[in-house]
Image: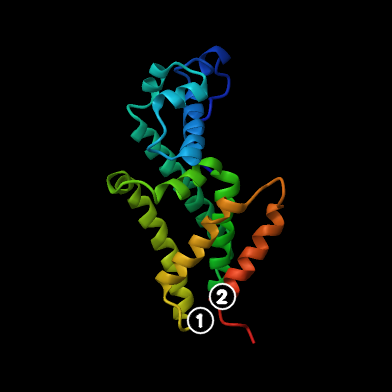
Amino acid sequence: MSTARVARPRGRPKSDANSQGGADTRELILQVSARLFLSQGYSATTLRQIADAAKIKAGSIYYHFSSKEEILQEILDTGINAVRQSAQERVAALPRNASSKAKVEAAMIGHLEGLTRHGGEFSSASTRVYGHLPEHLKKQNQKLRNEYSKFWDGLLAEAKSKGELRPHLTTSVARLVVVGAINWTTEWYDPKRDKLDEVVPQMVKMLSDGLFMSAG
């Protein structure tokens, strides 16, 4: 699965990849920036701090990014794309006759995996930093978020039309609660303490039980 992150092409000389203009340096800048945005916020983070943490010259950042805002936008885009692609691929892998419940649960699993495995710090930063940004910084990333919301709304609307979703639930509220609960995983999940293969089915069952009518 692609998360739009830059990888060093095979066979590339190490000296080029490790130079301050190489692809590895670009990836390092993004990773370090995501950590700093998470730990101290976007506004409080300076390009000087990013350069120091990445152990590069401050001017080298401009080889890859025109501004701190451009770094932020790539992190936000990569983060939301990681969970969106992971969720969509999980659903696409199901049999054509899969139930609406199976599709929603697959999307839950994919979103969780996108947050904790594929997107890593990018998805965490996208989830946790986004809400604290001024509107003009949110705007550029909003299109991707809207597209992902429509994906969830489609799954839930299908479940509702088939009578599988609990009748008192609206698709928009159901989406906000489910996606919000999954996103909160970044606040408490600790891979050193929790096994993801045990956490995922527990979360999916709790959320699914709240959404769907019981089989009996």
Determine whether, in the image, residue 154 is placed left or right of residue 214. Answer: left
Mark 2 Cα-neighbour bin, 10 Å: few <14, some 14–19, many ≥20 = some
Which residue type carries mark 1? Arg
User: Which is closer to the viewer, label 2 or label 1?
Assistant: 2
- Asked if the residue under mark 1 is in contact with the one under mark 2, i.e. CB atoms within 8 Å, the reply is yes
Determine whether, in the image, residue 5 is placed left or right of residue 142. Answer: right
Q: Position of residue 15 (x, y in %)?
A: 55, 12
Dot 1: what SS? loop
Q: Is residue 185 depicted above or below 6 in this figure?
A: below
Q: Position of residue 174 (x, y in %)?
A: 46, 71
Residue sitting at x 44%, y 17%: 21
Mark 1 Cα-neighbour bin, 10 Å: few <14, some 14–19, many ≥20 = some
Dot 2: what SS? helix
User: Visible in this render: residue 4?
Assistant: no
Residue sitting at x 70%, y 52%: 194
Which residue type carries mark 2? Gly
Q: Position of residue 33 (x, y in %)?
A: 47, 33
Q: Position of residue 85 (x, y in %)?
A: 49, 51
Residue indicated by mark 2: 210
Q: Is residue 179 depicted above or below 65 in this figure?
A: below
Residue indicated by mark 1: 166
Residue sticking out furthest to the bottom:
216
> Of callouts 2 and 1, which one flags the residue occurring earlier in the amino acid sequence?
1
